[in-house]
Image: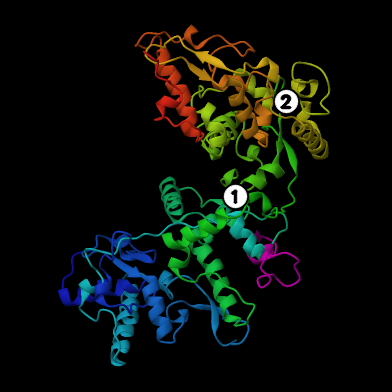
């Protein structure tokens, strides 16, 4: 904004911005900090900043505060938001769906926008004052809204995990007419023939698949404007012709909650219709507590027509040599769904085959993240290897995995890239993989191969040596001086580790070799029934040699790290439980 030529003329302009979201009925003192925790309903109003530098701070508008005042005044959302349709149930004259923009603000700019906001906000405050009730700032009280110390925002994003999703799936009051499921109540695609939104069975997807975050849309629009290229378009039409994610979510979720409330029946249940109800720390923490009580496996599967198992493999670009391709992975999709809290755990952009975006070579639209990277990057939680690494940090596994090298074993590839059942024999990986003809197999063929391979894998269990081949006790006495040698209950430890992982499918898949479990302690030696002693690599001195800690440090690091991670006794500080003082 340019410098004003008349202070009285412009003083009210900034006050007017306070009404971008709802009319301001709060007192002037509300635009001050309410504590370090902040509020979830803070809306920063800076729409005019796009036209130039603002002379006063942006307005911090407290949405829930104003919504409560509206209810107390027996007014509804239509005071600020354009009604979209009438409400169902008892009061059909009451609107229950609204456009989530402030009146027609999107259609105005400049002086027209300023006059509209001022007339609405100051007019509402003035009318409220006439009734003898407390109200918000009046004309010329600019700092009442444009406070240099605004209320801090404590808004947190809400995630629709499968527990919360199932609550909506099971609801009887949001079911669309003529549908046996609730999918159509929320999910839609653009029907180009009919030129309208419609539900398409088995094409349900995350809202993010179509609706961009506001900041992402702004960045993309700037990029398009700079390049002078055409507006981006996808299968659902122009990207810029649809609401951003926050606006789409609010319009869908809040309107549905309002409609449920409007039913006014004993059976009607509704979700929150306030900012704090979904976005406050208290609300989300309460949801997390309830979600934690639910075993993910017990939540009904989200049926989208997906296969129980599939062969995962990339689709090479046209003209790429496909001979000698890596063995595909038979992926147990149904099981991974059961242990994940939402589809976005893997499908981060949209629900589609990974090969849609990721290829051997990398595609520009996927930032050239290749197939190998997206599956094997250990630092990425969504990759197969990264997710498995997170699982290995659980108490039943972390004792070993905290101290063994992070790099993957050369032999671990075959745990996933095993020869599918039904593959034509021949070559190192099978003839179908060698010549690439596996890609030409029908979808039904590959589905059957995947299901048979998964079934074969599920029959396996973690293995180790027979009990008689595992030493019952191991005495460590090479460093004993003022303490007696430490006696390790070796076989008991191995049996305890086996017990902890007996129900783990991940352990069953990767602990097939008898010596694999031994590698948790004997981490750098060859896998063997009779691994070398620790002193073979760790010297008895006090200095590390070639990166190997001295023997005393290696013992303590190995044992204490394991006991701490797995909550085992003795604790790291209970020295005397392992080291008995030598009698003099």
In percent of the image, x 75 and y 16: which residue is there? Answer: 428
Residue sitting at the far bottom = 131
Label 2 environment density (alpha carbons within 10 Å; few <14, some 14–19, many ≥20): some
Looking at the rendering, which quadrant does residue 538 occupy? Answer: top left
Compare marks 2 and 1 and give the one earlier in the sequence.
1
Percent coordinates x, y for residue 533 in the rendering: 53, 10
Q: Are marks 2 and 1 in contact (CB under 8 Å)?
A: no
313 left or right of 242 in image: right
Residue toward you, 89 or 503: 503
Secondary structure under badge 2? loop
Which label lies toward us, 2 or 1?
1
Percent coordinates x, y for residue 485 in the rendering: 46, 14
Residue toward you, 279 or 102: 279
467 left or right of 438 in image: left
Residue toward you, 38 or 402: 402
In percent of the image, x 44 and y 45: which residue is there? Answer: 227
211 left or right of 114 in image: right
Is residue 188 magenta-colored? yes
Question: What range of the chain is rendered magenta?
Answer: 170-195
Name the dominant secondary structure of the magenta segment. Answer: loop
Pointer 2: what residue? 418
As drawn, 207 above or below 460: below
Pointer 1: what residue? 341
Res. 445 mark: none
320 left or right of 13 in image: right
């Amino acid at each position: 904004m340019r410098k004003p030529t008349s202070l009285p003329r412009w003083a009210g302009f900034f006050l007017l911005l306070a009404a971008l979201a709802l009319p301001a009925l709060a007192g002037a003192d509300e635009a001050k900090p309410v504590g370090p925790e902040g509020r979830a309903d803070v809306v920063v109003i800076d729409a005019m900043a796009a036209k130039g530098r603002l002379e006063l701070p942006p307005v911090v508008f407290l949405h829930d505060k104003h919504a409560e005042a509206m209810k107390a005044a027996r007014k509804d959302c239509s005071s600020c938001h354009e009604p979209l349709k009438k409400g169902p149930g008892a009061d059909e004259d009451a609107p229950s769906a609204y456009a989530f923009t402030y009146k027609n603000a999107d259609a105005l700019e400049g002086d027209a926008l300023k006059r509209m906001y001022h007339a609405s906000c100051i007019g509402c405050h003035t009318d409220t004052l006439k009734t003898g009730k407390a109200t918000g700032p009046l004309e010329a009280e600019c700092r009442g809204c444009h406070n240099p110390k605004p209320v801090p925002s404590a808004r947190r994003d809400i995630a629709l995990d499968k527990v919360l999703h199932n609550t909506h799936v099971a609801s009887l009051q949001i079911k669309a007419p003529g549908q046996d499921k609730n999918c159509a109540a929320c999910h839609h695609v653009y029907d180009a023939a009919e030129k309208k939104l419609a539900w398409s069975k088995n094409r349900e997807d995350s809202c993010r698949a179509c609706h961009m975050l506001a900041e992402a849309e702004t960045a993309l629009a700037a990029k398009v404007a700079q390049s002078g290229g055409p507006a981006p378009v996808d299968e659902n039409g122009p990207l810029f012709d649809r609401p951003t994610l926050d606006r789409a979510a609010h319009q869908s979720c809040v309107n549905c909650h309002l409609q449920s409330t409007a039913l006014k029946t004993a059976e009607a249940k509704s979700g929150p219709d306030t900012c704090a109800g979904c976005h406050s720390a208290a609300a989300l923490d309460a949801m997390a507590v309830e979600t934690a009580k639910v075993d993910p496996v017990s939540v009904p599967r989200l049926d989208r027509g997906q296969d129980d198992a599939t062969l995962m493999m990339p689709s090479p670009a046209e003209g790429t040599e496909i001979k000698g391709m890596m063995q595909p992975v038979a992926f147990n999709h149904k099981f991974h769904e059961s242990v994940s809290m939402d589809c976005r755990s893997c499908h981060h952009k949209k629900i589609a085959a990974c090969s849609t975006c990721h290829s051997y070579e990398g595609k520009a639209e996927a930032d050239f993240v290749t197939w190998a990277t997206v599956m094997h990057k250990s630092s990425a939680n969504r990759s197969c290897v990264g997710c498995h690494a997170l699982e290995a940090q659980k108490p039943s596994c972390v004792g070993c995995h905290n101290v063994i090298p992070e790099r993957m074993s050369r032999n671990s590839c075959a745990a996933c890239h095993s020869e599918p059942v039904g593959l034509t024999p021949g070559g190192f990986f099978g003839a179908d993989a060698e010549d690439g003809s596996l890609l030409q197999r029908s979808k039904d063929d590959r589905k059957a191969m995947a299901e048979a391979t998964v079934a074969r894998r599920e029959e396996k269990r973690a293995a180790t040596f027979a009990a008689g081949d595992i030493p019952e006790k191991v005495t460590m006495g090479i460093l004993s001086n003022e303490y007696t040698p430490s006696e390790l209950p070796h076989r008991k430890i191995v049996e305890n580790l086996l017990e902890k992982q007996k129900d783990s499918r991940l352990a069953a898949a990767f602990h097939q070799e008898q010596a694999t479990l031994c590698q948790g302690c004997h981490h750098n030696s060859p896998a063997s029934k009779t691994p070398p002693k620790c002193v073979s690599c760790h010297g008895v001195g006090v200095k590390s040699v070639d990166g190997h800690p001295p023997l005393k440090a290696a013992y303590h690091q190995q044992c204490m790290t394991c006991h701490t991670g797995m909550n085992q006794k003795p604790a790291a500080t209970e020295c005397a439980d392992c080291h008995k003082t030598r009698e003099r």
